Amino acid sequence: MSARKPVLEIRGLRTQFFLREGIVTALDGIDLTIYENESVGIVGETGCGKSMTAYSILRLVPHPGRITAGSIKYKGIELTTLDLDRMRSVRGTEISMIFQDASTALDPVFTVGSQLDEVISLHQGIYEKVALEKKVVEALELVRIAAPKEVMEMYPHELSGGMKQRVMIALALSCSPSMLIADEPTTALDVTIQGQILKLLKALVAKTGSSMMLITHNLGIVAETCDRICVMYAGRIVEDAETFELFEHPRHPYTAGLLTAFPKLGEKKDELSVIKGTVPDLMNPFKGCPFVDRCGKAMDVCSKHRPSRVEISRGHYVSCHLWSGGEPSDG
Ligand SMILES: Nc1ncnc2c1ncn2[C@@H]1O[C@H](COP(=O)(O)OP(=O)(O)O)[C@@H](O)[C@H]1O
Ligand SMILES: [Mg+2]
């Protein structure tokens, strides 16, 4: 492997919600690096912090939440303290996000064409009508929309779910981002369309050379789409390895549990919740490993000390006392 350049470097990221009833620690010390041209999958059960990771990167954590510790560097630029004007320009031109529900991202009162016009003129500096239309058609063709000139004239409500998602991907890619964050981009779609959209996303990031962070609760999706997988649990990344390595040698008992319950692509139920027990309450600070109550291999140390993150083989990281020899990282 040649020397790869990191695009995104997250260290010790903590994001918390300050509620009247107490403080919710949504992200509790996330470490994550995404390299150029790399697709990284973030998997975990609902509520484990996948979306907050994305929102923290874009500095869009909703009130009363905020980043309280750690660092997020995008191409060496610290995002957590970047002024809002520059942050807006990073959001528009460098890091694009695709949401689960396209209807919330598309403006219902404007046609598809005019929404693309706006993004393309803003980011590519093209204003002349014919040139702009050409670019809009190209953007729609890129996401394999068969009749781009007709779709341009349509309003979002006239499109099917899959078409809306394609339009949203076209919008996200129109600013040629270096990094695309897709938060459950296909969860709302039926299985056949899911597959098509994922193939498309994978092909587009390969073609444009951008990096992708793909968030999903479906392991089947990341297995097919991503180079590397980060497994999240209760606001932490518990394991992080290349896709093949993770599937062949899952080291964290939580990951192993997920793989035993490996879902089929598009299965409707919340596949990852088949491991017995419940996730800890993020409002109560816990000292040890968050998985301790559900773990079949828990030891004394697990409820007392937070496991440190160790690299157990090249590029394979795990935060588990079984692998760190009970060496605590807190205190
Ligand atoms: N608006 C909010 N108020 C309080 N807590 C929140 C809010 N949004 C998210 N959280 C907390 O952050 C955690 C992670 O949320 P999120 O990142 O949305 O999870 P997911 O992995 O399902 O995307 C939740 O379990 C919840 O405790
Ligand atoms: Mg989410």
Image (cartoon, rainbow, N blue to C red):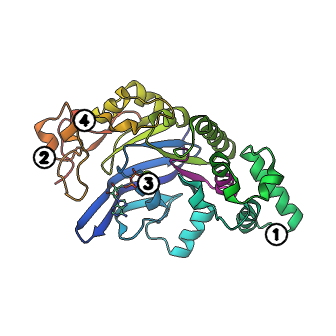
Q: Does residue 201 appear left or right of residue 116 in this picture?
A: left
Q: Given this view, does label 3 or label 1 mark the residue nearer the observer?
A: 3
Residue 95 visible (yes or no): no
Taking the magenta stretch, the answer to whether it contains residue 288 is no
Q: Of circles 4 and 1, which is in front? A: 4
Packing grade of label 3 (10 A; few <14, some 14-19, many >=20) is: many
Work out whether mark 3 precedes mark 1 in sequence or the reverse, and give the earlier one: 3
Q: Mark 2 or mark 3, which has the lower sequence index? A: 3
Query: Which residue, given by chain and number where applicable, does mark 2 sit on?
Result: 304
Residues at circles 2 and 4 in contact by the CB criterion of under 8 Å: no
Disc 4 crowd, CA 10 A, few/some/many (<14, 14-19, 20+): few
SS for tag 2? loop
Pick the quarter of the image with the N terminus: top right
Callout 4 secondary element: loop
The residue that mark 4 highlights is 276
Indicate which disc residue 127 carries: 1
Amino acid on which disc 2 is placed: Lys
Disc on the earlier residue, 1 or 2: 1
The amino acid sitting under disc 3 is: Ser
Is 208 located above or below residue 225 in the figure? below
| 3D distance between C-alphas at marks 3 and 1 | 35 Å
The residue at which mark 3 appears reads as 51
Which amino acid type is marked by label 1?
Answer: Tyr
Q: Are marks 3 and 1 in contact (CB under 8 Å)?
A: no
Q: Which residues are magenta?
A: 167-186
- Dot 1: few (<14), some (14–19), or many (≥20) neighbours within 10 Å? some
User: Counting residues from the N terminus, which is met first, the one under dot 4 or under dot 3?
Assistant: 3
Residue 200: x and y, percent? 66, 40
Cβ of mark 3 under 8 Å from ligand 2: the answer is: yes
